[in-house]
Amino acid sequence: MISAQLAGAPNQPDLRIDGELYQRWRDRVAIRVDGKGQRDFDPILRAVRAFYTDLQAWAAAESEQWAIWVAPCPISDAEVRGYGIRKRRVKERMDDRTRQRQPLLNTLLEHLENRYGHLRDLLAQAADMVGGQTVTLEGRTYQRLWSRVDERRLRLGGLANVRVLDLESGKHINVTHAEDAAFWEWTIVEVLRHSGVRIEEALELTHLSIRQYQRPNGEVIALLVIAPSKSDRERVIPMSAELFAVVAAIVRRHTTGGQTIPLLPRYDPKERQSSAPMPFLFQRKIGTKHEVMSDTTVVNMLKRRCVELAEQHPGFLATSFTPHDFRRLLATELVNSGLPIHIGAALLGHLNLQTTRGYVAVFNEDVVRHYQGFLDRRRQARPTDEYRPVTEPEWLGFEEHFDQRKVELGGCARPYSTPCQHEHACLRCPMININPKMLPRLDEIEVDLLARRARAEAEGWLGEIEGIDLTLSFLRQKRDQTRRLARVAPVDLGIPGIAPRSPARRE
């Protein structure tokens, strides 16, 4: 009776849920733990319906045990109808999320790398200075701070934190803590984006997860062993040079001075239990003890960096990154770059290819690639003389065609190398595009046509009257259409320009 307890009725005797109790339960399910609305609770409704259906099947097989629990399902067919449509809407939202973040990924990576490199160099230079000395780094001047607390730490045999004053902003910076945070921000993002692992899998990585494999030709490949997590199946990921460099940097940071990686237990909030002490890679020293990072810590790290980037990059004002975004971005990049989808599924740890397909069907690179290949093959089948260099008379004729398309009221849209089909009667021609600046000229032409019509009517020229009326109808249609288009404001498509050259990346 879990559903009844959630609805606030722990004394519910059986599974016969009345309408009021069911509505209270549904209202509660529609709200997440953090108080926000639950966008997609279809899986919950379908799971409950499946439970009621299973009870009926069990009662048919073992009536003495299950028959007393059989009850009508409170969830009607109408509530779960259209599940496929709602699932496609969820897929569309996820695809749109990936499209929005893909252009911002390089900006985030460059910011994290530059920030860590700046603080690393500042720490190296400020550590050897005494209080009051200044250092200039990348155009910013810092002054070393020193206090009695620092002197006391040195007397007790410890290490004083390196603290500086930014003379430009007046901000006090604990460089030791800032450099440590910047290092872990950079490494966790690099590991997530190069491996595509889930956040809980990344935080479960240990020193024992790093293996090597020697191929028959003698080549040694570094491997990253992902312990059982969501799918409860161990998998192995070949490490790229970039991923191996980041993992090696983490190991070097833990083993500086001949130390070993501390053995720590990690608490799993989903399983609600702590693991055995292990040499976890993503552990930090907080105060005097080491602690394994949590997924909340990683989410907050990314949120802070996105807020900081929003001050200079408008794209981050309404967009932030989560750890799972890097998994989707990697899956999209792998498959759209030509990697077979079943290989991508194995690397990502998906048991179903449709799950991987849901990650990657964002940019239709496969469609574009095949269509471009079709165009190339079609060009190869065409006569070669069509691709000969353009002669001077042909080019002059090409330019002359576009010059001749310019008429008084605007421009003619007839195709290249085709003559005028309407004997230059532009007002009646459907190919004419009226320039909005020529609207006053249309009014003048209308006045002239009305005067001509009055003269024709007075003289009894019936054929002339019919022709003028036809011209007037075309004129008024084109004028209304031009006015309507002129009222439409231009739309900014956001086509990017040439970005300013960014400072060179650090080694």
Image (cartoon, rainbow, N blue to C red):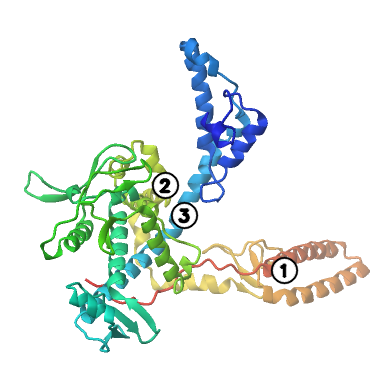
- Which residue is under mark 1? 483
Residue type at the position of mark 3: Arg
Q: Quadrant of the C terminus?
A: bottom left
User: Compared with residue 373, is residue 474 higher up or lower down, i.e. above or below?
Assistant: below
Which residue lies under the disc numbered 3? 97
- Judged from the image, the secondary structure of the residue bearing numbered disc 1 is helix
Q: Nearer the viewer, mark 3 or mark 2?
A: 3
| Residue type for callout 1 | Arg
The disc label shown at residue 276, or none:
none
Q: Position of residue 210 (x, y in %)?
A: 17, 50
The circle on residue 361 is 2
Q: Residue at x 85, y 64 (%)?
A: 465
Name the one closer to the observer, 88 or 473: 88
Give the left or right position of residue 426, taking residue 463 as reference.
Answer: left
Tell me how far mark 1 sits from mark 2, CA to CA.
41 Å
Q: CA distance from mark 3 to mark 2?
A: 12 Å
Residue 380 point in image, percent of width and height:
33, 52
Label whose residue precedes the other's in the sequence (3 or 2)? 3
On the question of residue 184 being in view, the answer is: yes
Rate crowding at label 2 as few (under 14), some (14 to 19) or many (20 or more) other CA atoms within 10 Å: some
Q: Of discs 1 and 2, which sits in the foreground?
A: 2
Badge 3 density bin: few <14, some 14–19, many ≥20, Cα 10 Å:
some
